[in-house]
Image (cartoon, rainbow, N blue to C red):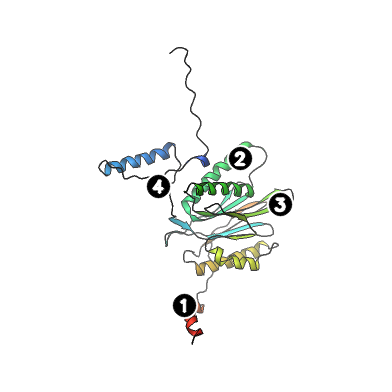
Amino acid sequence: MAGMRSPPPPPPPPPLWLRPLTSSGVLSGGACRASVDIAGAAATRLSGGHSTHTREHTLYPHVTGTSVIALKYKDGVIMACDTGASYGSNLQYKSVERIKVVGKHSLIGASGEFSDFQEVLRCLDELTFFDHMCDDGNSLGPKEIHSYLTSVMYSRRSKFDPLWNSLVIGGVKKGPNGEEKYLGTVNLIGTHYEENHIATGFGNQLTVPILRAEWHDNMTFEEAVRLVEKCLLVLLYRDRSFINKFQIAKITAEGATIYQPYSLKTHWGFSAFENPSKHSIKESMRLLFL
């Protein structure tokens, strides 16, 4: 009718990190939503008209990575992990990269569900993209990345749809007191802290005592590598999911470097490995009461 105003245009879609997830773990909207709807329609046809397509949250990890080791040294932060990803107790992938560069000043490493880590990386890509678009002469540092991920992990936990990861964030950025090294972690329920050395997963029980005993603030890069490799060997011997293919990364004021994967020389001739029952708790108790 004459005189009527046209309806306002629809609002733009929300940023990536604010969009809800579908049951399959992909972002809602557009082609992702269409693929879910098509899958549901196909399931309805196959079941004779009764829909078998249910929407569920991912409440248990499937393809997972193991521990991440990280520590500060004199010039920056070093981070290391293996390149395996397991489906349950079976090794499914042998060349997975679980350490990535974020922006100009940060590294991130992840234990846990690998698909959730990919979702975290997508959120960080968009976050750093919008930060770059601001063009204000500043960029997000590791402390800001850690704070953002803490909010994301706690938000998802509060919705009973957590991202099944333990994340390690390290980096170097110029601050009021010069180049400042930063190392922090956050887990799937939003628990977070900063530390001079961090280990996730099984490494939190097995390697943190080694790090506490041997780490010092003035370590050279070569000393840091030797300490990290010692921790990796302990995990290789004790964690069945760990594989002998490791990747080390470092970040300094000059930038980040992720080195090619390599293996370590191992020794399996320890008496506890050759005769496990001899060193068991049951055998020790038997000898104690003889």
Quadrant into which the N terminus falls: top left
Mark 3–mark 4 contact, CB under 8 Å? no
Q: Nearer the viewer, mark 4 or mark 2?
A: 4
Dot 3 amino acid type: Glu
- Sequence order check: which comes first, mark 2 or mark 3? 2
Of 276 and 226, which appears nearest the observer?
A: 276
Q: Residue at x 43, y 43 (%)?
A: 22
- Rounded to the nearest angstrom, the CA distance separating label 3 from label 4 is 46 Å
Q: Secondary structure at mark 1?
A: helix
The residue tagged with tag 4: helix, strand or loop? loop
Residues at marks 2 and 3 touching, judged by CB atoms closer than 8 Å: no
**SS of the residue under disc 2:** helix
Residue 149 x/y as whole percent: 57, 48
Q: Amino acid at mark 1?
A: Pro
Decide: few, some or many residues near mark 1? Use Cα within 10 Å; few <14, some 14-19, many ≥20: few
Q: Determine which residue is flagged by label 1.
A: 276
- Judged left or right of residue 219, residue 150 is left
Residue 154: which disc?
none
Q: How far apart are labels 1 and 2 at the CA level?
A: 55 Å
* Disc 4 to disc 2, C-alpha distance: 33 Å
* Residue identifier under label 3: 179
Residue 250, image x, y percentages: 62, 56
